Amino acid sequence: MVSTETQAEIAEYLGQVPSWITALPEPAADHSWGIVRDLQLGETELEQREKALVALGAAAAIQCPYCIRFHRAEAELEGVTDAEMAEAIAVTSGVRYFSTVLHGAEVDRDEFATETAEIAEHVEEQQSAAPSDD
């Protein structure tokens, strides 16, 4: 169970202490809230909108109905449209699909890393050569 101090903080952030908080084992409870508070809800390098889309994609990939519901609501609060959520989920599914292919085919990781670096270099060169909109 989270400490009384942490319960008060959670209630201030979320308007209540969600029932799932009680599922956290005592040694990790306050720390677990700190991760949510500091990384997911706090000011970081990513905007809240971006974090909501990343989290929704991850939730869909791991097929967690709890996380999908929470992060969909979070994305809606950030003004993310249904079309944008669908795209984020589709991008995530592409990553999962190709990860399955790569692992199943046992593609050589060193060769993959080399090819990826070459592709990135080529794309960067193409972007540099493209006429500017300015």
Image (tube, helix red, strand yellow):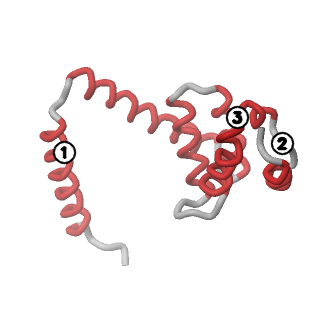
Query: Viewer-proximal residue, 97 or 129?
Result: 97
Label 3: element kind: loop
Query: Viewer-proximal residue, 29 or 106?
Result: 29
**Residue beneath disc 1:** 113
Give the Cα distance between marks 3 and 2: 12 Å
Query: Viewer-proximal residue, 82 or 106?
Result: 106
Q: Toward which corner of the image does residue 128 lie, by quadrant?
A: bottom left
Residue drawn 56% across the image and 53% down it: 50
Residue drawn 33% across the image and 30% down it: 99
Q: Position of residue 51 (x, y in %)?
A: 57, 51
Residue 24's tag is 3
In the image, residue 67 sits, relative to residue 123, either above or below, namely above
Outermost residue, top side: 104
Q: Tell me which label, 2 or 1, sits earlier in the chain.
A: 2
In the image, residue 15 sits, relative to residue 71, either above or below, namely below
**Residue beneath disc 2:** 17
Q: Tell me which label, 3 or 2, sits earlier in the chain.
A: 2
Quadrant where the C terminus lies? bottom left
Label 1: element kind: helix
Give the Cα distance between marks 2 and 1: 45 Å
Residue drawn 46% across the image and 36% down it: 92
Q: Nearer the viewer, mark 2 or mark 1?
A: 2
Disc 3 residue type (three-letter): Leu
Tell me if mark 1 has few (under 14), some (14-19) or many (20+) residues whose alpha carbon lies within 10 angstroms of its own: few
Q: Position of residue 72 (x, y in %)?
A: 67, 39
